[in-house]
Amino acid sequence: MRTIYGINPVREALRSDPESIKRVIVSGARGAAAGKGNAGDRARRELLKLAEESRVSIERMAAERLSSLTGTEKHQGIAAEIPGGFAYSSLDEIIGVWKKSGKAALIMILDSIEDPRNLGAIIRSAHAAGVFGIIIPKDRSASITPTASKASAGATEHTLVARVLNLTETIKRLKKEGLWVVGVEANGETDIYSGGLDRDLAIVIGGEGVGIRRLVRSNCDYLVSIPMHGNVGSLNAAQAASIVLFEALRQRG
């Protein structure tokens, strides 16, 4: 059973596939949810209406019980249970969606992103940038957990995410399909503004603190860096991913 929590993740799950949801759980009394309340109360009322229209079961429970169920107090008073785990996609599915689109490829490869909040934030930016899919390794990587889903603001419900055994072999496959593979590193041979991000592209973002692993880096076609100013010499993975993704969109016009 997969549990997601927070207003945005539950809303997007109801919008994308309400039939997959076993139940929506809301904290607070029925009368409180029906009253005027604050913005959070109004958002929960809208979600409950959406659940009712979709014929999804609704259950109420005390906030303390909901915190215990979700493992956090930051559930915003609402959660949903979905049978089974997160539905990962395949690499073939991502490639197929790209080819069917007729557009230039834009795919993300995340090498050892271990913080689920960073993973969720990257998925949120990637979805906004229109990527065809995100590829993560099965080992040494965060997976799609409730925390990642919350950090993505529900983008996990709309974004293809593939888990692969070997990133190096995956990169080789993408190259055979005609993609260029570019790694984002502080010591890249060129910066993102002159790095040719307007072609069929897979962007590699390395893990927190360690960056892109040597074997993955050596299989990239080239490396690009983000120009930095000031006394802080680095960005976290989610920030770097957002900057590179939207620079790629800018270059594509």
Image (tube, helix red, strand yellow):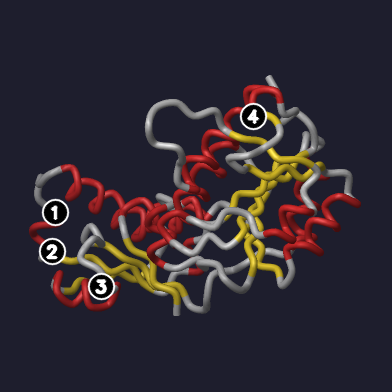
Query: Alpha-carbon neighbours of circle 2 within 10 Å: few (<14), some, or many (≥20)?
Result: few
Q: Which residue is mark 4?
A: 192
Amino acid type, residue under disc 3 in the picture: Glu
Mark 2 in CB contact with mark 1 (< 8 angstroms) = yes
- Between tags 4 and 1, which lies in front? 4
Disc 4 to disc 1, C-alpha distance: 50 Å
Q: Residue at x 61, y 43 (%)?
A: 185
Amino acid type, residue under disc 2 in the picture: Arg
Q: Nearest the camera: 230 or 143?
A: 230
Q: Which residue is mark 2?
A: 30
Disc 4 to disc 3, C-alpha distance: 49 Å
Q: Which residue is mark 1?
A: 34
Q: Nearest the camera: 169 or 178?
A: 169
Query: Alpha-carbon neighbours of circle 4 within 10 Å: few (<14), some, or many (≥20)?
Result: many
Quadrant of the image containing the C terminus: top right
Q: Which of the marked residues, 4 or 3, is nearer the chain's N terminus? A: 3
